[in-house]
Every structure is written in structure tokens, then in C-alpha cells.
Image (cartoon, helix red, strand yellow):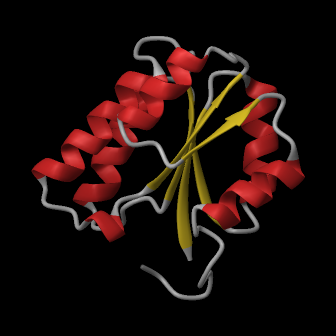
Amino acid sequence: MKRILIVEDDMVSRKFLSKFLSRYGDCDLVVDGLEAIDAYLLATKDGLPYDLICLDVMMPKIDGIRVLKTIRDLERQNGVDEAKTCKIIMTTVLGETQIVQSAFDYGCNAYASKPIDMIKLTAVLKKIGFLENLDSSR
């Protein structure tokens, strides 16, 4: 079963993503960047790393770009094979190309604008290879 972390401070978006993504794996939900890093560290420590993280850009405490950079830095420090790094989709209402570009510079796999569209999100999940081999683990 795939493991998914949804990092979203907006309750409506969090519920929507959870309902939509729960068909693809077990979803954990957190509401800010600090909780996201804690959840990532705990999952890694337990030997059950996340396969997918949906990460909101604008959040309290630590924004999504800094969370993304932290996770990618931790993966590098821990010698995670590039093929086994978790897939990270940034979500935001912002259309600023600078923020989107910096997210890709730090290693996000895809970007989805809000409000999230199920058809577009499914296409993104296919494009980044998340929906392949759903029955098998990493």
C-alpha cells in the first residue's frame, strides 16, 4: 500500500485531497510545514517513507518551498537513491512563475493549481509515475 502525506492548512482542500487520494494509498494529514517535516522524519525513522507528498506552498510556520528543500536535503544526506525519493506535488492558488520555478529548482515532481481538478490531478499522478505499479511497493 502506498503512503501519502497531505500538507494543507485549508480544511476544505485537505478533505478533498484526502478523499481523492485515499483510493491510491494510506493518507496522513498535517496542517503546517513544521508538522510536515516531523511526519516525514517519523515515517523515515519507522522505515515507512512516503511515496507521495502533496505540499501546499503557502502555509503557517514553514512554507512549502522550505519544506520541499528540507525533505530533498534529508533524502540526499541519507543517501536515498534518486529512483526511490518520494514524489512531491506542490499545490497553490498562486500563479507566480517565480515560486513555481523555485519549487522545480528544489526538486518537486509536479505542480497543481487550486482549486484542484480531479482529472488534472490524475493526469499529474500518471505523468510522475505514481499510479504505475500501485499493487507493488517501492
Q: Height in image: 60 above or below 138?
A: above
Side of 70 where 36 appears, left or right: right
Side of 50 where 92 appears, left or right: right
Residue sitting nearer the eye, 109 or 137: 109
Q: Quadrant of residue 50?
A: bottom left
Side of 9 where 115 appears, left or right: right
* Image quarter in which the C terminus is found: bottom left
* Image quarter in which the N terminus is found: bottom right
Residue at point 35%, 35% (across, down): 106
Q: Quadrant of residue 30?
A: top right
Q: Height in image: 11 above or below 47?
A: above
Q: How many marks?
A: 0
Residue at point 80%, 54% (across, down): 20
Residue 59 rendering spot, x and y as whole percentages: 54, 16
Residue 9 rendering spot, x and y as whole percentages: 63, 22
Residue at point 82%, 41% (across, down): 16
Residue 135 rendering spot, x and y as whole percentages: 61, 87
Residue at point 82%, 50% (across, down): 120
Residue 83 rendering spot, x and y as whole percentages: 34, 70
Q: Quadrant of residue 23?
A: bottom right
Side of 66 where 131 appears, left or right: right
Residue sitting nearer the eye, 16 or 126: 126
